[in-house]
Image (cartoon, rainbow, N blue to C red):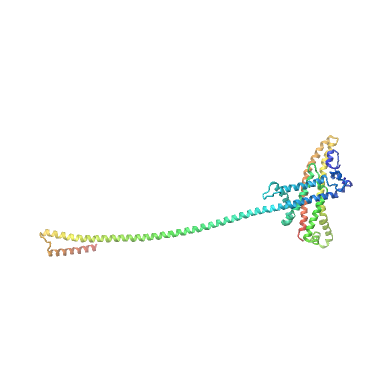
Amino acid sequence: MIHAAEGGTAILFPIWQEILVGAIAFGLLCFVLMKFVFPMMEKTFEARVDAIEGGIERAERAQEEANQTLEEYRRKLATAQEEAAAIRDEARADAVAAKEEILVSAREEANRVIAAGHAQIEASRQQLVRELRSEVGNLAVDLAGKIIGQRLAGDADTTATVDQFLAQIADDTAETSGAR
Amino acid sequence: MTDSAIVLAEGDSHFPPGTDSFNFRDWFTGLSDTALVHMFTTITFAVWASVAILIVFFLWAYRKPQIVPTKRQWIAESAYGFIRNTVSIDLMGKKDGVKFAPYLATLFLFILIMNMWAIVPGIQISPNSHIAFPAMLGALSWIIYNVVGIRKHGFLGYLKMTCVPPGAPWFIYPLLIPIEFLQNLILRPVTLALRLFANMFAGHLILLVFILGGFEMLNAGNIFIQGLSVFSFAMGIAMTMFELIVILLQAYVFTLLTGMYIQGSLADEH
């Protein structure tokens, strides 16, 4: 029963029953842990790595997408700015052209109005001169008749004299207006 | 009656402790004269209890593994991950490391829990202080690293690799080859087993010396010596703490060396 009775070295000799027990127990432990537990842990580790790497990948993709969107937005903005500048330039050019046109037409209009005014004034003057001339003729005849005391009306000579006189006046008037 | 626990219970002074302090009586005295002797003792109980604790804990902790681990799942993963990452993968690289991690982790946990019995109150004896268990584990390591080496390099290739160190001048071979052969193929499992066994044996002996010594002093007739027994018990407690370090360290060393031997067998020929 007492194993070590043979002496101190007995502790260095294994008891075979204990080896057997140890081997069976350790074998059982190995079987359970190495078959059911640790492979599952490896799977979990892998799943975890996948989850983390997948997350990083997703984040990278989102980042890239955002960058692309930003780039696109910037490009659009630049195009829009260019377009706006073009439109502005065009509008300015149009405005300048319109201004020129308006100025030209206004000047023409003014000239036309001025010319029409001149013509009208001239016509009025001619008319006045004509009216005045006949008025002056009549006045002169009336005056002369009163001075002479005789009716000159209807006398052919008188009429001729008056006409001659008026023609002379007309000539004078023409000269003076031409000199003016 | 050599069970130390019995010794204390009976108040029978059994000082100084000797090698017979490691002999535990059979639980069923009827078996003592049959082949089943030594099968049911405190020692074998501790072995089965170790296995039961590990199996129950790991199956319970890893019943429903999740990506984001629960606390117990995390503990179980840390126990495995510790050996997997710091021993197996560190030594053998990712591919082979993952392949051998389950065995090394099982080995580590088994030795660790077996060692722990050395300081568990009521048991206070590690099965590893009986050479049968370290010897069994050492033999298993020996088989594994040799089989791995022979599979990888062929029998002769493996023999050449382990026994003929590269770079040595030819005339030293007659001296070197026997030494390398002895060292790498014979003594490795022996040293593995002896290192673990001797540490646990000595640890138990030291605890016995201080604790039994304390009782011995208490039983002395001299009041002065009885008072001094306090220091003996305090030393016993301090040594228990020290024993905890030895327990962790020896479990780690055994696993690390087994890993290194396997790695050596896997290494490419120089």
Left or right: residue A82 versus residue A48 is left
> Residue A50, located in which quarter of the rendered image?
bottom right
Residue at screen point 34% across, 61% down: A108
Residue A14 visible in the snapshot: no
The residue under the point 47% across, 58% down is A85
Q: Is residue A168 left or right of residue B244?
A: left
Task: Determine the residue located farthest toward the right in the rendered image.
Answer: A6
The quadrant of the image that shows the C terminus of chain A is bottom left
Based on the displayed image, in which of its 4 quarters is residue B242 positioned?
A: top right
**Total labels drawn:** 0
Residue B247: x, y in percent? 78, 47
Placement of B39 over or under A170, stated as above or below: above
User: In the image, residue A129 lies at what x, y percent?
Assistant: 21, 61
x, y (%) of residue B164?
Answer: 81, 60
Q: Residue at x 48, y 59 (%)?
A: A83
Q: Position of residue B153 (x, y in %)?
A: 78, 61
Residue found 78% across the figure and 53% down from its top = B258
From this view, report whether residue A110 is shown above or below residue B35: below
